[in-house]
Image (tube, rainbow, N blue to C red):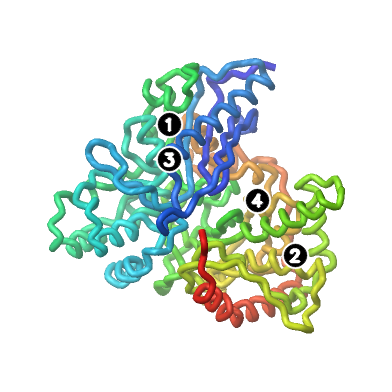
Amino acid sequence: MALDLAKCALGIEFGSTRIKAVLVDEKCAVVATGSHEWENRLENGIWTYSLDDIWSGLHSCYASLQEDVKKRYGQEITTLKAIGFSAMMHGYLAFNKAGDLLVPFRTWRNSNTHEASAKLTDYLQFNIPERWSIAHLYHCIINHEPHVKDLDFFTTLAGYIHTKLTGKRVLGIGDAAGMFPIDSTKLDYDQALLDKFSALIADEKFPWQIRDLLPEVLVAGQNAGTLTAEGAKLLDPSGKLQAGIPLCPPEGDAGTGMVATNAVAVRTGNVSAGTSIFAMIVLEKALAKLHREIDMVTTPDGLPVAMVHANNCTSDLNAWVELFAEFAQKAGAKLDTNELFALLYNNALENGDPDCGGLMSYGYFSGEFITGLEEGRPLFMRTPHAKFTLANFMRTHLYSSLGAIKIGMDILVKDEHVKIDRLLGHGGLFKTKVVGQQFMADAIDVPVSVMATAGEGGPWGEAVLATYMTDKAEGETLPEFLNNKVFAGAEGSTLSPIPANVAGYNTFIERYKDGLAAEKAAVASLKDEA
């Protein structure tokens, strides 16, 4: 069956370990996909990807999509209804007037901006996390980095790609909220805080104003430009793709995660669990207090959102599974990766003790702000009389992958009394059915749903945003569009917390907090040889 490409929308998301493309039809059903694996690297103490990594990765991902379309439908991609790009939020990509990158891309994973983050939070009386773009900029300022005087523009990864393809310096409001605080009543950067920041750095006498450096803020449904001839060649070096295709506002992976899980309405929430993990709750009202552990961001259409973000989630967990895969191969067992994940995860769920039998791990590949660590050292511990079984071992790593986010969510649920009607999960942790979903429900003590589309995650969410831009009815809001045209009749499953497991996780998390001293000692005493 042939595709009507003029009715198809494309979403491409740059995740931490994978770039993925999802092509959808007019009903937002997935019709083709493409992907490319990549990994950030630590260079001169900075977690980064090179510009060559970005463009070669995009070309590989798009070529993979082209191949899938050709294989399934016997067609070449020459045009599309709309395109959208999304990526891991925050970070720092800084350019001069000639468009040259001034310093290597500093990703969200860097936690060296602690001093800048703390000073800005105190001065603005608004939580400025370490990974936010403005924290990176202020870090450069207080450290007198020479490139700052030459700044003409800075943006996120999604914003950079979008600008190169369209010539437009714009950003979706959800991703913009990771650059500088947003005023949700005006759907723009908070002008009062911009003025305060300008006053803070006035003595530096830079030849620019902060607002002029920032991308223009757009909301879901707005046109964010069209694919230029140069942009078409950048995206598709084969030359088959035509220019003139409209693009929706580029978003962060938090915003696309909200869309992918239909969690953009008040009292809904979603949790994205992969290399990093974040939970997003759409608020009924502002929080009573400023909390350094809670970010204030927005939905793609501008509603205020409380975000709890942790840098580490499944990296160490996946490393242990890879170790077992190596053993299985040496033993001659024929298990593919999905079978091995299912075997280990289900055993943890079915046979592990609710409190993990006294075992403990910290899957910290990098620093973790919520628990006060600027660097990480993956660490496993047990007492001599702990119940050291395979089920408890894997359950410990699954529990630990949620440890930091649990501490942050307790602030919202227990301290701020935020009400959550539903929490929807997506990302790699949920690919093995039931297990990650159940442990998440037990950890947060809230029912967790996973939709059938959740496996496609952010890139599908960005494709939906591209579709919303072109297909929305007059006056149709994003929640209405999602409920009526995208998720109507969608299949999914919901798991409620199991009281015994909730109690077990609460015991585990108290041990987790107590054991952080050992993780901090490991950071202090073990040098990272990378």
Q: Nearer the viewer, residue 186 or 139?
A: 139
Dot 1 lies on which element?
loop
Query: Which label lies toward us, 4 or 1?
Result: 4
Dot 4 lies on which element?
helix
Query: Which label lies toward us, 4 or 2?
Result: 2
Q: Report if residue 192 is visible in the image.
A: no
Please tell me how crowded label 3 is: few (under 14), some (14-19), or many (20+) other residues with Cα within 10 Å. many
Check disc 3 and give the amino acid type.
Pro
Check disc 2 and report the residue beneath it. 394
Labelled disc at residue 428: 4
Check disc 4 and give the amino acid type.
Gly
Residue 65 lies, with reference to residue 524, above or below; the image says above
Please tell me how crowded label 2 is: few (under 14), some (14-19), or many (20+) other residues with Cα within 10 Å. many
Check disc 3 and report the residue beneath it. 250
State yes or no: discs 1 and 3 in contact (Cβ < 8 Å).
yes
* Cα distance between the residues tagged 3 and 2: 37 Å
Residue 500 lies, with reference to residue 335, above or below; the image says below
State yes or no: discs 4 and 2 in contact (Cβ < 8 Å).
no
Q: Earlier in the sequence, mark 3 or mark 2?
A: 3
Labelled disc at residue 247: 1
State yes or no: discs 2 and 1 in contact (Cβ < 8 Å).
no
Q: Earlier in the sequence, mark 2 or mark 1?
A: 1
